[in-house]
Amino acid sequence: METIIPFFILLPLLGFLISAVLPHQKEKLLSGFAFACIGLQLLGLMAFIPNWVLQDHQFLSYPDILVYNTADYSFFLSFTFDKVTAIYSITGAFLAFLVSTYSRVYLHREKGYKRFFVSLLFFFLGYNIAVFSGNFETLFMGWEILGISSFLLIAFYRHRYLPVKNALKVFTVYRIGDVGLLLAMWMSHHLFHHNIRFSELANDALVVSHLQSHSLTGIFISAAILITAATKSAQLPFSSWLPRAMEGPTPSSAIFYGSLSVHLGAFLLLRTFPFWEHQMSVRIAIIALGLSTSFVSAMIARVQSSIKSQIAYASSAQIGLIFVEIAMGFDVLALIHFAGNAFLRTYQLLVSPSVVSYLIREQFYTFKKRPDTLEDSLPKKIANTFYLLSLKEWNLDAVVAKLFWNPLKSVGKKIPIHKNRTFLFVLIPSFLAGIFLFMKEELLPPYIFHKLPLVFSGIALTLVLRSFVERKDVFLSWSLIIANHFLIALALSFNEHYNMRENMIYLSGISLAGAFGYLLLYLLKKKESNFDLAQFQGHAYEHPRLALLFLLSALGLSGFPISPTFIGEDLIFSHIHQDQLLLAFFVAMSFILNGLSLIRIYARLCLGPHQKAYHEIPYKSS
């Protein structure tokens, strides 16, 4: 039965690739192909799962697909199937099939009809890679695809201001979770001394033997996993991104933020439960987080004026309870709760336009007084306090901005790099000096030489921080990101004398994507006079092909799984030692901010309201 597992990955992949080349004028062909592809996946699962149950298999594992191997480390893709995968995959396939059917008519004659179905199949591919993943590396691949497809679907109405702005907001929160997942992968390599599979975590003897002498390491990995799960599943303090994600079309809101994508944080906890189940402090933290999120989100949901926002916060509250169930060891109950919540929220979001229309009409004919509720029995001051806090959504947006993004922006604005000539006359000589010192190691005292990885990775982080806040020179922002990657490679070359071929794998993707991006920026600048990052330019409207190619180059430069850089990032992370937490943090933050800065450049140049007066320009609030 193991040999059938790749079918459930290859079918969505093939469907996505074929749909990308179908003509956009053929609506029936596009929607029919997506309908058939997802339907075939659903039929396959409906045949496979009963057979799996009857044969009483507990855990199926497909043979590892080796991608790259060294003496110290192996990078491979691993796919598994168990009860968690069974529930998540069949629920995902059924709801994706339902949404594809609904969207065939709902989006009729929409300008982005093809774009929607291609993005839907792209999401479905990432979702299946994630739920069938057998190790952290494979999970991270699916995680990255889900993040990008999420951004594209929220910004589906790309000629408007709010969808693009909110898509960027959601993507920034996702990147916080990516930091946690990267650090969890890095520390797990050092804890187990190999690329750990999820099936191995079920071996209590193996896990306990490693954690007995490395309890702090176990808590660190568990905390990183919890941060990742909290961001993906809209738990405190990250809950406010979920209603912002509802700016996309109703079908994408239903499948992404009501049912599937938002439950992947719970999936991560279920998948790693054998690792942290014996860490009582972690279980208490998850229970506290889940209960507090349920309490706060339920109150916010009760005062929302938008039906989509109300459903979003209600879903977040239920996921908080799912977190509690997982932490208490009720995994079967959590899976049933997941499926029930996913089906309910999908139904609610798909019928929400009709419900709103009906209620608006009905309120003129039938008025019913609101029944007394629990909060009516509270003292007025307390009830009003909770009411105002809920109206302001407990200022969660401001909390995340103050804790995470404002400090980074303030540091980035103070870095004195304003023109490309600074880059040419300061950074390039510094990089060449670093290469010289690497080759002439004997010229430096050992204690200074061992500090150089931290120095160069710190410089690399400052460069990407400056790129992150750049608002004028697009070429400077792009150059700083490329320089960041080269300095990261140099920093880790000082850290450990490893095979330079690994650096070449990492930098090959950077070089190709960087050069291609320069070419596209030059072509776009020749065509357009408005060419800065101060506001959204909307150039995708007149130059859709250039915009698509630039998005691909940005993804390649960020280390997305379409270039060797994705493998290279994991390889160079394996050369950061266990006691170099600050170095690991610098490198992880560099990777995350790189992706965020690149998507921001793409959004500012290609998305948003048109800057030309002869195009229709929607209001910011529309």
Image (cartoon, helix red, strand yellow):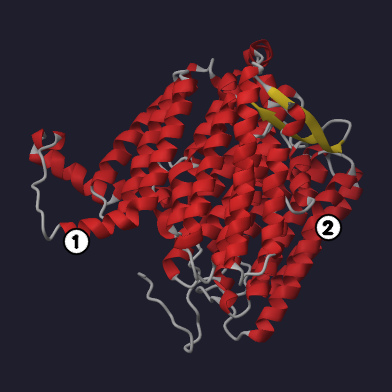
Categorize mark 2 by other alpha carbons within 10 Å: few (<14), some (14-19), many (20+). Answer: few
Tag of residue 433:
2
Q: Position of residue 244 (x, y in %)?
A: 41, 55
Does residue 605 appear in the picture of this structure?
Answer: yes
Q: How many marks?
A: 2
At 61% from the left and 28% from the top, the residue drawn is: 49
Q: Quadrant of residue 567?
A: top right
Q: On the picture, is 222 further left or further right than 325?
A: right
Which tag is nearer the camera, tag 1 or tag 2?
1
Residue nearest the observer in this picture, 143 or 1: 1
- Looking at the rendered structure, the secondary structure element under dot 2 is helix
Above-or-below relation of 505 to 417? above
Tell me the CA gap for discs 1 and 2: 72 Å
| Three-letter code for the amino acid on which mark 2 is drawn | Ala
Asked whether the viewer can see residue 596, the reply is no
Neighbourhood count class around disc 1 (C-alpha, 10 Å): few under 14, some 14–19, many 20 upward: few
* SS under mark 1: helix
Q: Looking at the figure, which quarter contains the C terminus?
A: bottom left
Query: What is the x, y in percent for residue 544?
Result: 63, 74
Compare marks 1 and 2 and give the one earlier in the sequence: 1
Q: Tell me if label 1 and label 2 are in contact, CB under 8 Å.
A: no
Residue at left offset 57%, top offset 54%: 120
